[in-house]
Image (tube, rainbow, N blue to C red):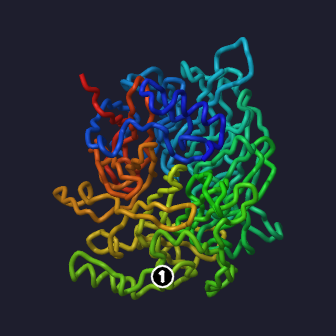
Amino acid sequence: MRFRYLTSLMLLVCIAPSAYSQTIEWPFYGADDGGQRHSQADQITAENVDQLKIAWTYRTGDIDLENPEGTSFENTPLMVNDRLYVCTPHNWVIALDPSSGAELWTYDSQQEQAINYGNHYVCRGVAFWQDAEPSADMLCRQQIVMATNDARLIALDADTGTPCPKFGINGQVNMGPTAPVVYAGEFQITSAPVIVGDVIIVGSAISDNVRADAPPGTVRAYDVRTGAPRWDFDPLIREGASSVVAGHANVWSSLSVDQERGLVFLPVGSASPDFYGGERPGDNRHANSVVALRGATGELVWAYQTVHHDVWDLDLPAQPTLATIQHDGKDKDVVIVPTKSGFVFVLDRDTGVPIFEVHEVPVSTNGVDGEMLSPTQPIPSLPKPLVPQSLTVDDAWGFTFFDLAACRDMIKSAKSEGMFTPPGTHSMIMFPGTGGGANWGSGAFDENSGLYVINTSRVAHIITLIPREDFEAERIASHGDGFAPQSGTPYGLRRDLLLSPFGVPCNAPPWGMISAIDMSSGELVWESSIGTTEDLAPLGISLDLGTPNFGGPIITASGLVFIGAAMDNYLRAFELSSGKELWKGRLPAGAQTTPMTYMVDGQQYVVIASGAHGMSGTTPGDYIVAFSIPKQD
């Protein structure tokens, strides 16, 4: 099938894939700007992957061992401009030699490190831009653009790390929150910006469940040369605006770009707050939607909503994948949209119309007083859900009779009526939980086979709405764990993982999976568990039970899938055609991120950030680790 973007083709492939003297880059957060996470590198194969060794390791220095819960090292580096570009949780940018890991330059954004951000300190990636217009000034002809936790947009010269003097003020634009915040960390930016032509587009991460009148999730655009504002877009339509109290519908995850069409695709989150919607009647469009905009102007082209009037925190967490699939015997340009619920929506890229039939299925509207639930929800006929969507007493699991009995009791005492069970003052089980299903790691697509690969988690939450008059007393009695105020509504929130007394999920393993879907038919091809208990259980006991996971897969032209993500300290390689695990390489810390790969000087490298996810409790660190096959003398 044809490559979609001339720009991506020029950056990704410099010489034919069979010539090992070539350079193959990774110039975008998702490999190409449509997020396929696919590389033409093919030196590492199923036959030699077991020869992979650590080629080099670099330590960033951005780590706080006294407070590891406060940061998450979720970065996927870029390799372009003969440099590897890394951003750290506190928004340092570091340029490394891609062959040796030697430091070339560093830039410290001087971020305040005492702010309590709701989503931790995170920098998932940066963007690269090259100016095609002739200019006598070579400084910043190639730029690295980063959005920061404290809502600044920073442009650096890609060769030297020097701030671009013509961009904003001394290389920075202070975007600030889109509305006043109730605490400094309520608003931040965690994902990489994208660039359409000469326009930088940026979303935002806003703390969940703080209040009904939270800041709006406005997407903003800036001139890539000057930093001047170009346009903004608020996804949320406030029907009967005077009576609606709502914010968010933000785009906290990664955006995708179709340069040929001049479009940007937004994975939009839910309206505020997540678990009660009585203050925001209606479907709350375009929250929980894939939205296509004109990159130059912000004009709405189409929008498709995946959840109506969301009260389950089912925001779209993943970068939409722009792919070309075979459908009805023809090439079809599509947008692949994974969700926390385990559904995968496949949409026509020009119109947003589903490729596979989607049914509006009746669901319960028996919510709490004041709630206004949608009577139907969209359910795709294909692909089938990637995770179970209900949990009953018969599904309870435990290592021993004691914890099995405890899990049965907890499930029995809560409402468990499957997907779209309304939250209430009587506890209900949400399965999968609010971490997914799929999450921000997104999927990877191989155009040769038509396979789409994505990892999912299988852990449940117990959700309880607490009447406002009882909320503070219950929060204090429970030491505040899992509580959120949802101010401006009649109900606060309690959200707990459904775990046994031994601290393991009450549902049967595997708790983490990686799956492949044939996008031409929508059928599941294979699924495999991912992750062991080695770095979770006492004495390093390693049970192949799968683990919850954060981060995503990549695919190479040789038919390999590389992924970290699991809650043990490994990078793994799977066979694309079968899902068989072929290799795993030990890492010094957790790798709850997405790897990347490139080829330089005749050598293919697979690189991953190894530093943990604060919320998951995995091994903290500040490592960038590169694997390659040692050269033969």
Which residue occupies 48% across, 65% down? 437
Rendered image quadrant of residue 30: top right
Residue type, label 1 = Ser
Percent x, y for residue 347?
A: 67, 61
- Neighbour tally class for label 1: few under 14, some 14-19, many 20 plus, Cα within 10 Å: many
Left or right of 364 in this view: 451: left
Rendered position, 212 above or below 66: below
Residue that badge 1 annotates:
427
- The residue under the point 37% across, 58% down is 579
- Marks counted in the figure total 1
The residue shown at (54%, 22%) is: 161
Please say whether residue 474 is visible from this viewpoint: no
Q: Is residue 236 above or below residue 258?
A: below
Q: Is residue 584 left or right of residue 110?
A: left
In this view, the residue in front, 604 or 227, is 604
Position of residue 287 in the picture relative to residue 510 (left or right) = right
Q: Residue at x 54, y 32 (%)?
A: 13
SS at badge 1:
loop
Looking at the rendered image, the quarter that the C terminus falls into is top left
301 and 507: which one is in front? 301
Q: Is residue 419 above or below residue 213?
A: below
Query: Which residue is at the far top?
Result: 136
In the rendered image, residue 462, in percent from the top left (x then y), is placed at: 45, 76
